[in-house]
Amino acid sequence: MKMQVYHQIGFRHIWNISSLGEDGAGDGIIIAPRHMARTCVENLPKRIREKAIFDPQFFLPNVAKGKLVTYDFFPDVMSEGFQTDVYIDKFSLESARKCVEFQESNFFRYITIPTRYVTGMPTTYMEDQQELFINPFLKAIIDMGIKRKILLQLVLNDDMIKDEEYSSDILNWVTGITEIDGVYLIVERSLTPKQVKDIDYLYSLLRFVDILRLNNLDVVIGYVNIEAILLSLADPSIVTIGSYENTRMFNIRAFEASDDREITGPTPRLYISRLLQCVDYRYIGAIIRATDDKEDFFDKNKYQSIMFEPNYKWHFTKPEIYKHLFLVFGKQLEDLSGLEGRERYIKVAELIKSAMNDYSMLEERGVVFDENSDGSHLPIWLTAANQFAKHKGWR
């Protein structure tokens, strides 16, 4: 199937839904019950639900945070206080049945089997996931005669991906589950810069996705940022775009019980496709003064026009910032989806090299970016792309 772009829903999900419907940005949404109550989901137009993926978000089954409490099949709600052994013995099958029934009755694109979040690289990872959710969900699906395609959710960490033996074991396990049609893959990174700067991780992730695809499994890569451009080389079925960073980078803290920490809003950033970067808005004036091609350096659309008005007040709660990202970045990914194999690699490499050249040009003209707005990720991405291309015989 041709690579598609889905919105990773989070807080202020109305931005994503309106971007999808009004601007044609993306192909569908991944629904987050943490942020969308059950009735809100059920009231979505059928045309949206039919293309949507429901993420049960059972990551921490003992914490029904936010709107998760409105779903009677969430483990902590179902069991009135989650305890692993008790849940497996008394509640797991009923929870699975109700969750499957909910997904089927809402016409979602897939039936998603959830996963539990773990740290490190536990030796019992596969057995524990199988017992807790996979077996009950598969039994419920079979007993109910559901014919919809099945996605198995995996939440891994970068160490799992980079460890060749561990990742190989996971791949052998997943590809041996004959009942599933695809994998909804989420990877939590231990280092959290704005853009991924780990060659080994990126190369290993490309290999991981590639093997799943070679085994004829659909692959949905969730919670990714601009590195989706690079990951497109492994030909995933779906990559995601998100608004706030917690939908572009998985962090389990978003699902933990609330604490008293003061949360400060992020610095507003403008996505500049030529740089493959979301740049701190305070650099915009400097970029304008440094460039000769003012009309072409920035991506022009109705949201850019609003943001560049003299009286525009930049703030992280302004929807234009994110709708601009959805529109521009979504189009870049859409363009790549029309290419395959070596042709896609050549295009991705060209995009990265061009961005590196633009950064060099700006630096020569006196614009010095901070580490969260610069292009230091680009050589790393190009190296990973080149090595993956060599592995595939494209160079």
Image (cartoon, rainbow, N blue to C red):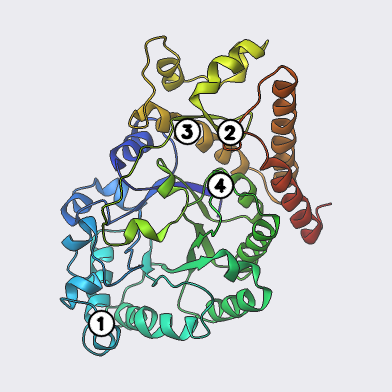
- Circle 3: residue type: Leu
Q: Which residue is mark 1?
A: 83
**Disc 2 crowd, CA 10 A, few/some/many (<14, 14-19, 20+):** many
The residue singled out by tag 4 in the image is 193
- In the rendered view, tell whether residue 386 sits above or below residue 301: below
Element on which disc 3 rests: helix
> What's the distance in space between the residues labelled 4 and 1, CA to CA?
35 Å
Q: Earlier in the sequence, mark 3 or mark 2?
A: 3
Q: CA distance from mark 3 to mark 4?
A: 19 Å
Tag 4: residue type? Pro
Q: Mark 4 or mark 1: which comes first in sequence?
A: 1
Cβ atoms at labels 4 and 1 below 8 Å apart: no
Report the residue marked by disc 2. 373
Task: Find out whether the residues at labels 1 and 3 contact each other: C-beta distance under 8 Å.
Answer: no
Q: Which mark is residue 145?
A: none
- If the image is split into quadrants, where does the N terminus sit? bottom right
Cα separation, mark 3 vs mark 2, equals 15 Å
What residue did someone put label 3 on? 325
